[in-house]
Amino acid sequence: MKRIGMLTSGGDCQALNAAMRGVVKCLSCSGEDVEIYGFLDGYKGLIYGDFRMLTGHDFAGILTKGGTILGSSRTPFKLMREPDENGLDKVEAMKQNYYKLKLDCMVILGGNGTHKTANMLREEGLNVITLPKTIDNDLWGTDMTFGFQSAVNIATDCIDCIHTTASSHARIFIVEVMGHKVGWLTLNAGMAGGADIILIPEIPYDINKVIKAINEREARGSRFTIMAVAEGAISKEDAKLSKKEYKKKMENYPYPSVSYEIADKIRKKSGKDVRVTVPGHTQRGGSPCPYDRVFATRLGAEAGKLILKGEYGFMVGYKNREVVKVSLEEVAGKLKMVSPDATIVKEAKMVGISFGD
Ligand code: F6P
């Protein structure tokens, strides 16, 4: 008999359900007796003992379903060691709930912050297996996270739609893509959607270079320009600021997001007409794409296999086209960013995409 706890933490994404289904199906197909305890709304559920016992039925028909059947929330890692408003020691509470239910292991699905806490629980002596979810694809130790490909599809669809309207007007169109502090989503959706300019946090932009690229397109006879701008895009001047100075600047930031600042600068410097589209959380919504369904199922199955073997303390990731286990210690606290020297960036430049650098 295996008693497994499960939770999904942080921002949701597509294929969380598919991954959990993969774990449970693998365990039940092995013939092993299993009890599944689903903790609700992320680590909160584990802290406050808010759980539901789940059966095979709960995992039926969810392969294609977006969101997470367990609910999710963000419980920042930096607050985990701070008592809650009633003085409760959160880490101790999580351990007590784990021991009370006599769990063999916790299966934790999440991104960066989630992995820091998962690793802390491992250090505290709990058995933990994690699965890498996030549309940002910024998790260290895995070439791919589930949710990413589905979000690329949605952001690309958005750029495609903008393309048809852009061709009717002589305008600059900015599509702002999610991705937190990294540019994987913007880079991939931008290339897939044929964006002319791609701005990502890892390659700070110079607004004059951006305008130059727009002017060069116009000189070649193009009526419009499409820009894929990461929500974390940053100018060369801002990139030079210290953390403190940048935080101060953001306190009095007059724009809803960076794209509006960039649009304003382009308008003021060039007099051109600019429109901004922000697909926002639609990028995390809807059904997982077929790639993510297969990918999440594979990772879930491998997680199930590790549980059956009693191998804990790992994230199930993907490296060089193989599903691999990576120690949580190695994953926790590191970001996987786009290198400005990456071949994909060079290839994008080779086909004329400007990064404004
Ligand atoms: O990490 C996933 C993500 O969608 C990021 O791309 C984005 O910056 C953030 O979450 C948005 O967070 P929230 O859903 O809390 O607004």
Image (cartoon, rainbow, N blue to C red):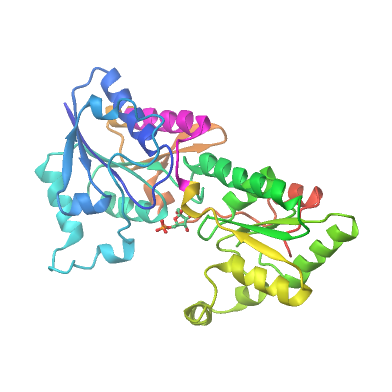
Residue at the left extreme, as displayed: 100
Residue closer to the observer: 131 or 162: 162
Q: Quadrant of ligand 1?
A: bottom left
Instruction: Locate residue 204 relative to residue 318 in the image: left or right.
Output: right
Q: Give the x, y percent position of residue 55.
A: 20, 28
Q: Give the x, y percent position of residue 112.
A: 42, 54
Q: Quadrant of residue 275?
A: bottom right
Which residue is drawn at the image coordinates 21% and 50% (left, top)?
45
Q: Quadrant of residue 172?
A: bottom right
**Magenta span: chief secondary structure:** helix
- Does residue 216 sit above or below 267 in this rendering? above
Which residue is drawn at the image coordinates 33% and 34% (left, top)?
20
| Image quadrant containing the C terminus | bottom right
Instruction: Locate residue 334 relative to residue 51 in the image: left or right.
Output: right
Instruction: Locate residue 311 relative to residue 277 in the image: left or right.
Output: left
Residue at the right extreme, as displayed: 220
- Does residue 33 sit above or below 224 in this rendering? above
| Image quadrant containing the N terminus | top left
Which residue is drawn at the image coordinates 29% and 31% (left, top)?
307
Q: Quadrant of residue 93?
A: bottom left
Residue closer to the observer: 154 or 271: 271
Residue closer to the observer: 207 or 114: 207
Q: Give the x, y percent position of residue 346.
A: 75, 51
Q: Indicate whether residue 140 is drawn in magenta.
A: no
Is residue 239 visible to the viewer in this orientation of the structure? yes
How many numbered circles are shown?
A: 0
Residue stretch rendered in magenta on the structure: 284-304
Is residue 124 visible to the viewer in this orientation of the structure? no
Q: Indicate whether residue 287 is drawn in magenta.
A: yes
Which residue is drawn at the image coordinates 31% and 54% (left, top)?
73
- Does residue 57 sit above or below 84 in this rendering? above
Q: Give the x, y percent position of residue 312.
A: 30, 39
